[in-house]
Amino acid sequence: MARNEGTYKAQSAAAGEGQARAGVPKRASQATKMVPLPTDSLIPERDQGQTILECRHLGIDFGGLHAVEDFNFTVGKTEIAGLIGPNGAGKTTVFNLLTKVYQPTRGAIILDGIDTANMTTPQVAQAGIARTFQNIRLFDSLTVEENVRIGLHNQVKCGMWSGIFRLPRHWLAEKEFHDRALELLDVFGMADQAGAVAGSLPYGAQRRLEIVRALATAPKLLLLDEPAAGMNPSETAELMENIRKIRDDFQIAIMLIEHDMDLVMGVCEGIAVLNFGKIIAKGTPEQIQANPQVIEAYLGKQETDDAALRGKGRRYQ
Amino acid sequence: MDAIRNMDKTTRSNLITYGMVIVAFAVMQGLSSIGAIGSSTKGLLIPICAYISLGISLNLVVGISGELSLGHAGFMSVGAFTGVVVSSLLSGVVANGALRFLLASLAAGGAAALAGVLVGVPVMRLQGDYLAIVTLAFGEIIKNLLNNLWLGWDSEGLHVSMRNANDLSLEAGGKILINGPQGATGIERLSTFTFGFLLIIFTLIVVLNLVNSRSGRAIMAVRDNRIAAESVGISTTKYRLMAFVVSAALAGMAGALYAMNYSSIVPKKFDFNTSINILVFVVLGGMGNIRGGIISATLLTVLPEKLRFLGDLRMLIYAVVLIMVMLVSNNRALQATLQSVVERVRRRRDDDDLVLDAEKGGDA
């Protein structure tokens, strides 16, 4: 778990020197709008300063409630990042902000050097963020293969007229759809279920299919919302393997929300802990496990005997 | 036979649909050539073709795209009047009736598609009940617009008025094409049963091919799960609008076929009741089930005519029959019985798939 302790500034400089990134000059011209830089960003050393996602002072209000506030988080190019926190902390809201289901009230999201301000959900998806959902959202009435084909929608182009009049473009596209869908399904051992209706799959297979569909969009960053929910320990172990496999095979970054601490501590490299919409801790799994604030958020404050007695005394007065 | 069995399920199902339409057409053609069909039934053939096309096109919106549209008759009337106007404008230019019919149909489809875009762009911001109400309102607006539209043609060109026929100030030899509430009169009856059959086939090709293509999958993805569709980069507005406009264009062509079967049509014909009738075809045939829609459109167009001998009771019986069919077709016990019969037949047919079939039976 060697980590680059550099600040955001250092990462940015390294990126500028190391390789020409599309977004870098653009960002320089935006520099007139000065924002304080997060100083506690961490990404894996192997990513050599290349970040895929940077959230800066991200926040959203629902009415008067600050659902997410001052969310600063950086994900490296091939990092497996974790986002944890008690129920209602705002974890899924962060995912919804990243995918523009909600537009942020404050702050910026920078995906691979491009500011996603004013983008819509489909645009962000095309820019490279794919996700799965806490409550599975498959295209239930369609087959497994069709679900993956829909994931490939923007990878293979074929217009409406080609489809209606069965022009050569259509047949070429359909063949490519079929081949690529089966190839992806094969990675997760689901190729033999290609013809099954997605809604009729067992729970675990539905979760896997959602990941395959998300991967079909050729993302740079994959967001997994509670991928292990409802899984038994052996399924969770398999999932951990799959998450690592996705990172290694596809060379993408993964950010996951999960309550299963075995999975989070086992697979995540950088972790942020959210409570009441604010990050209360960031660091490696070891740092997070030892952080008193995190323990307090999960288990509550440990009352000293004195304080407990005092409380009791007051109640009986 | 093996080739048919090995075919993928949708292709086979689509072929059955095409085959059914072709066989029905051949049978009716054969019967009418030997004079076995009465004139009242013969008069129904073209309306049936038009209603089948309307049912298929509405199925694209209601069944495939999953939106409730209550204004399908509006698009039908746009197509009907455009078709009639274009065909009578072309009567001096294009001598061939079939070509004139084709051009009028294409113009009708184009005009209805344009209406579809105009209505669809603002309406696609809405969903569910709201969409239904706005499409309902659109149907009424079109009807009332046409009720107050006068269109005439003379050597100077087209004259349009929203007041009355005199306001058109036509020359002596001028022709009134649309005469307000009296609609279009003196229509040349270009529609034939063969054209109707070809329109059904064309509609089937467009809808079935669209559904089984990249765009069609996107439309169904939006129907099944809007949020998930957006999350994989599909623009929901684009694909909902696509289904809506294609459906409108096909409805317009069906409208032209319908109108050119009569010597006169009135805007009042294309009212809310007609929209609901088309919706009933779709719902009764099964939403998204094209073949079912074709059958129900045929039966429900024939039924009210065949019940004429009942006099005043006609529509009452029609309604009762509708309710009974809905009840029976949704009866779980009956469905299960039917399912088990189908399973038994299938099991006898091929023992290889025995295990698979048993599993399916367990699910049901």
Image (cartoon, coloured by chain):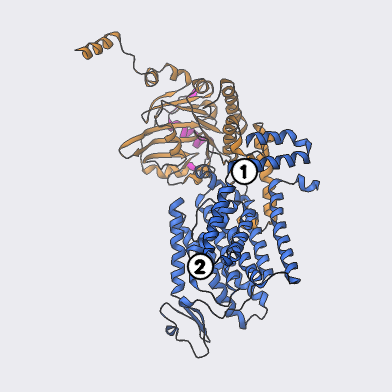
* Rendering coords of residue B10 (x, y %): 68, 48
Seen at 62% across and 59% down, the residue is B299
On whether residue B46 falls in the magenta region, the answer is no
Image spot of residue A86 (x, y percent): 41, 25
Task: Please give the range of residues in magenta.
Answer: A3-23
Q: In the image, are marks 2 and 1 on the same chain?
A: yes
Residue for badge 2: B270
User: Is B107 rendered above or below residue B276?
Assistant: below
Q: Is residue B245 visible?
A: no
Residue A5: x percent and y percent?
Answer: 45, 24
Q: Nearer the viewer, residue B196 or B98?
A: B196
As helix, strand or loop, the secondary structure at mark 2 comes to loop
Q: 10 Å neighbourhood of mark 2: few (<14), some, or many (≥20)?
A: many
Q: Amino acid at mark 2?
A: Phe
Chain B color in figure: blue
User: Amino acid type of disc 1?
Assistant: Leu
Residue B75 or residue A61, whichever sits in front: B75
Q: Which residue is mark 1?
A: B334
